[in-house]
Image (tube, rainbow, N blue to C red):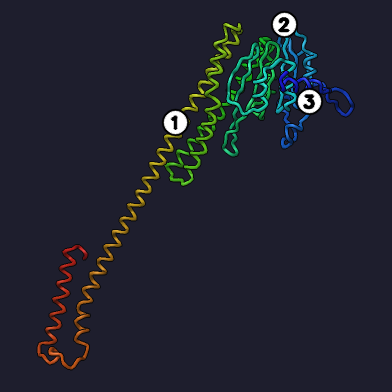
Amino acid sequence: MSDWRVRAVRASKLPFTRPTNPAGTTPAQPAPEHSMDPRPDQPVEHVSLERSVVDAGVYCDGHRLASATDLAGVYRELPGKPGTMAWIGLYRPAEAQLLEAAERFNLHELAVEDAIVAHQRPKLERYGDTLFVVLRAARYLDDVEEVDFGEIHLFVGPDFVLTVRHSQAPDLSTVRRRLEADPELLALGPEAVLYAVLDAVVDGYAPVIAGLQHDIDEIETEVFGGDPQVSRRIYELSREVIEFQRATRPLLEIMQSLEAGFEKYGTDEELRRYLRDVADHATYAAERVDGFRQMLQNILTVNATLVSQRQNEEMKQLAEAGHVQNDEIKKISSWAAILFAPTLIGTVYGMNFTTMPELQWAFGYPFAIALMALVCTSLYLIFKRRNWL
């Protein structure tokens, strides 16, 4: 016997008792699907097996016959006659409990391993007469403007449905109440439960799509507004869209696989219509997500272009400013050179040497003035010709 089977047998021998209230009586109703572990920071290994079963019921022809608080109770209540099925909801179960379920419902060890490890991509696999389905739920958090992704595993057999949730979404209590309020649909058996869960997951994509569309609209405004932080937001939103795409795109393959088995497994005609409707909504969601990814790529390209244009404009302005400064420097240098010429001549004749012929010359002063004027005029014309003045 394989190791996991040995562990399952040992787990099956664990005592299962119904939780009692302080008076020692058995509660009338099981915990709702959405009742989470009140201490989420507590390690999963420390969660009791009974508390992992958030709801478990036995149904016959669409009506609930009995409720149980543990797998052993469900197994005892399941009569095994046609039209009867068990629906068990687990939230972050311990490994021992999944092994217990595997032993009691003859689940394949590979599927059980996937359910224990979690973090699987959406998929549908058939092991004999049991379907194993992995779905990725999503919800949009308005306060932080982020998408939160969850994971749910379904084991769908001839007379049972076992749901294993690893996140708060989706709220399967709503799904259970919806089906219990529609006995005709629930009477179609485990496939009806699979449809309802698929429908809840796909319907949960609509608010996410609306939230992402709003974020993209805001980003477009920020891009053209020149917000310097927009590149980071585009990158973060692109990661969320890619993750959302990984949740929606494989869902189309799941729906196609289900539709391909309609005839072989004798799926009810009315249920086929419901599943096709879910497939249409899933296709719409996948197409919108693909469009979001393309839009973000285009926005990122436009943002890069705008940033490049702004940088070019800044470089142009710096170049123009540098050109203006060069012109001013040229003008200042030119006038400095022009003014330096008479200063040089005056300095020469102001050295007070005794032997200087021009000092005793009658035309010495006019000569010096004329020389200054000639040098200054020559420098002015030279600088003017070179466009320095």
Q: What type is the residue that disc 3 sits on?
A: Glu
Q: Between disc 2 and disc 1, whose residue precedes?
A: 2
- Do the residues bearing badges 2 and 1 touch, measured as CB atoms within 8 Å? no
Q: Between disc 3 and disc 2, whose residue precedes?
A: 3
Q: In which quarter of the image is residue 99?
A: top right
Which residue has dot 2 on it?
Answer: 82
Q: What type is the residue that disc 1 sits on?
A: Gln
Looking at the rendering, in which quadrant would you find the N terminus?
top right
Q: Distance between the residues labelled 2 and 1?
A: 50 Å
54 displayed left or right of 303: right
209 lies above or below 305:
above
Q: Position of residue 105 (x, y in %)?
A: 72, 15
Which residue has dot 1 on it?
Answer: 294
298 displayed left or right of 239: left
Q: Distance between the residues labelled 3 and 2?
A: 28 Å
Asked which secondary structure carries label 1, the reply is helix
147 lies above or below 375:
above
Q: How far apart are marks 3 and 1 (CA)?
A: 47 Å
**Residue found at x 40% / y 41%:** 304
Q: Where is residue 213 in the image (x, y as percent from the top left)?
A: 50, 32
Q: In which quarter of the image is residue 274?
A: top right
Label drawn at residue 50 = 3
- Say which of 209 and 36 sits in front: 36
